[in-house]
Image (tube, rainbow, N blue to C red):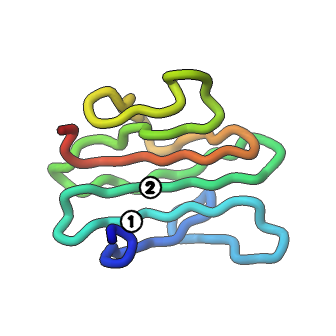
Amino acid sequence: DLLASAEIRWHGVALDAPDWGDHSHSIAFTAKSAPVEREYHVILSAHVEPLTFALPDTVPGTGPWRRVLDTSLAGTDAAALGHEAEPVSGSSYTVAPRSLVVLSSGPTR
């Protein structure tokens, strides 16, 4: 339901610059629910080397990006929800090779 009603922006390693080419190995998107209560930024990388992706600003009042999932991390560091999700600092996120990352902003309840 979130994706069906969300405003979606597509990205590559740079914001608003997805690489739709046949040889692209990465893509990212930001999905904003309406009305904005929660926002997700999803990064998929099938590249064989780490890639650093620019992060969009969060909607004012929704707080920082928080790491919900990073498949390159081990054990309990890989996934967390709500207040247990690690805040992400900075304007970029480095994604390990062949990994999926999900960031979220919004209420931590």
* Percent of width and height locating residue 25: 76, 60
User: Residue 59 occupies which quadrant of the picture?
Assistant: bottom left
Disc 2 marks a residue whose amino acid type is: His
Instruction: State if disc 1 and disc 2 touch (CB < 8 Å).
Output: yes
Label 1: which residue?
Answer: 31
Please give the label number shown on residue 39. none
Which residue is located at x 45 percent, y 44 percent?
A: 91
Query: With respect to residue 76, does 22 lie above or below?
Result: below
Which residue is located at x 56 percent, y 61 percent?
A: 28
Q: Residue furthest front?
A: 1
The alpha-carbon separation of the residues under discs 2 and 1 comes to: 6 Å
Number of labels in the image equals 2
Query: With respect to residue 25, does 51 lie above or below?
Result: above
Quarter holding the C terminus?
Answer: top left
Disc 1 marks a residue whose amino acid type is: Ala
Report the side of 21 relative to 78 (left or right).
Answer: right
Q: Which of 52 and 77 is in front in this view?
A: 77
Which residue is located at x 20 percent, y 64 percent?
A: 36
Q: How crowded is mark 1: few (under 14 residues within 10 Å), some or many (20 or more)?
A: many
Report the side of 106 relative to 81 (left or right).
Answer: left
Which residue is located at x 36 percent, y 43 percent?
A: 65
Report the side of 70 relative to 81 (left or right).
Answer: right
Label 2: which residue?
Answer: 41
Q: Earlier in the sequence, mark 2 or mark 1?
A: 1
